[in-house]
Image: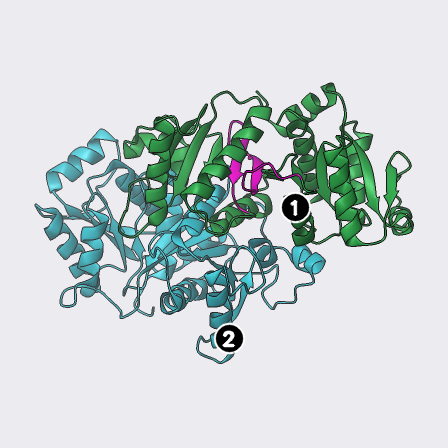
Chain colours: A cyan, B green
Amino acid sequence: MITSFNDLLRNVKEKPKKTIAVAMADEEDVLAAVANANREGIADAVLVGNRERIFECGERAEIDITNFDIIDVETEQEAVVRSIQLVREHLADVLMKGTCGTATLLRGVLDREHGVRSGNFLSHVAVFEAPGYHKLLLMSDGGMNIAPDVEVKVAIIENALVVARRLEIERPKVALLAAVEKVNYKAMPCTVDAAVIAKMAERGQIQDAIIDGPLAFDNAVSQHSCDVKGINSPVSGDADILIVPNIEAGNICYKTLACLGKGKVAGLIMGARVPIVLTSRSDSEEAKFYSIALGMITGGRSI
Amino acid sequence: MITSFNDLLRNVKEKPKKTIAVAMADEEDVLAAVANANREGIADAVLVGNRERIFECGERAEIDITNFDIIDVETEQEAVVRSIQLVREHLADVLMKGTCGTATLLRGVLDREHGVRSGNFLSHVAVFEAPGYHKLLLMSDGGMNIAPDVEVKVAIIENALVVARRLEIERPKVALLAAVEKVNYKAMPCTVDAAVIAKMAERGQIQDAIIDGPLAFDNAVSQHSCDVKGINSPVSGDADILIVPNIEAGNICYKTLACLGKGKVAGLIMGARVPIVLTSRSDSEEAKFYSIALGMITGGRSI
């Protein structure tokens, strides 16, 4: 079981190196993160985009990109198509967004004919290393699905479970978060969804995980909080995965930890045939680097 | 301007000591927090409840309560009524929940004849001292209003502004949070609310504050994040108050910082004629202590 980002890096380095395809690689931040990952021995990369602009960008930021293959294309659309083709031909294990638009990239991923869709919904899975927690903690979905219903929440859980398994977490404990731990069927729909999904898991409709909710955040990560409140849950105080009720809660959770709490974070889009590294320009260098490492451990044909 | 909890404590100690009325004080945690606050010279207290049980509780936990007046009553209902009466008679400046039910206490507060309602909605205001931020940061509402509409959100802002002013923050900067900084009028109603409220503030419908939104969490607390995204907001990177779109987002934000991020937190219910300290048993000792201190700086007849 991988319990920290250092653990994750060690683990990635021990495995055969995988390749990341970068769609529109002419962005300094992205090039820097990929070059850094390559120098650390955790990733190879194919850079797709306008060769001249990629070189200019590397020179401007003094980033050594001589280790990478470059596929020269002109337009954003071509860059997306070619990057995804690399994945389809098993020449890349992970997809990464450069300067192309998120919508363009995801449309390419989901294209029925030329894409790499898997039949599942796409969702964002974050991984936290927090000063106040004893292991890595996954959280979803703070980046993709705005107000997921039960069907989408189940898909969100399945995608998070894929990442958890790659982190060698056995029978991950999944907490379905709300603001309270009681079902409030009149005023808090997310507590109802949580109750329904917990029962679905109990009936075997979601496999190989221990799933409970509704739980408040503190119940999921603190046994003490469950003790004083008399909450008896198989997940209490030891959650591996937090499922948040809506995108606002997830997004604010992620950024509270990263911006205010000095936690380390990484994230991936899951649900396609390969993980997608889709960092924001406002993410820290560190977050981009860990996200690539997470992609490396998560990617590969056996997803 | 008060920029840390230590600052807050210093400030409270310099002022005339105020009094907290505890409704049903026979709880060890609450007694310990009140006794601690008294020892530190920041609060007097009147303990309301069954005298015998209060003494037993103090002895069991070895807490010195000889400094406090006790009002001996039998039932929860009586304890709530008498505590609130102390406030009405200006014998107490702050109300604190002991073992009485939250609903019972708030019903008493809102009682049209015998309560201490002020005409405003009640809301929870949290105050953070975070390792990653340069000053105190207020957040609301993660504890009271489940899915506030624009009217309630404006009340939530007004209540937070009362606390901000008591913390001597001039023209507080208020960020109306969403998962994104763009208005998504089709799929994200909270971005629409934020746009509406920001315009209301511009038109003078909310006074003495700089209010902007929608903003993502990172835009509100990190200038760097605004720079790379080209966001130009008077609030960017320097928010004093975060207004979250729903109770789940606020609750998860508060607990992410407290449980995972090693931040310091405090909280009050605002909107009545006095602040209400309503800590949860799962709150840390420290959070209870800072919440009392926050009540002390916020309470008093000039609210």
For the N terminus of chain B, which image quadrant?
top right
Which residue of the protein is positioned furthest toward the left in this rendering? A74
Residue at 57% over, 42% down: B122
Residue B119 is covered by the magenta coloring: yes
Which residue of the protein is positioned furthest toward the front in this rendering? B113
Is residue B197 rendered to the left or right of residue B186?
right
Tell me residue B284's x, y (percent).
Answer: 68, 45
Where is A18 relative to B205, above or below?
Answer: below
- Amino acid at pointer 2: Lys
**Neighbour tally class for label 1: few under 14, some 14-19, many 20 plus, Cα within 10 Å:** few
Residue at 78% over, 31% down: B91
Corner quadrant of residue A146? bottom left
Magenta span: B116-142
Residue at 68% over, 55% down: A224
For the C terminus of chain B, which image quadrant?
top right
User: Can the viewer see residue B35?
Assistant: no
Estimate the spatial distance between the alpha carbons at disc 1 and disc 2, rounded to whole Å: 40 Å
Q: Which of A149 and B194 is in front in this view?
A: B194
Q: Which of B124 and A246 is in front in this view?
A: B124
- Amino acid at pointer 1: Asp
Corner quadrant of residue A61? top left
**Neighbour tally class for label 2: few under 14, some 14-19, many 20 plus, Cα within 10 Å:** some
Q: Nearer the viewer, residue A108 or B240?
A: B240
Residue A220 is covered by the magenta coloring: no
Which residue is disc 1 drawn over? Answer: B111
Which residue is disc 2 drawn over? Answer: A199
Q: Which chain carries label 1?
A: B
**Which of the two marks, 1 or 2, is nearer to us in this view?**
1
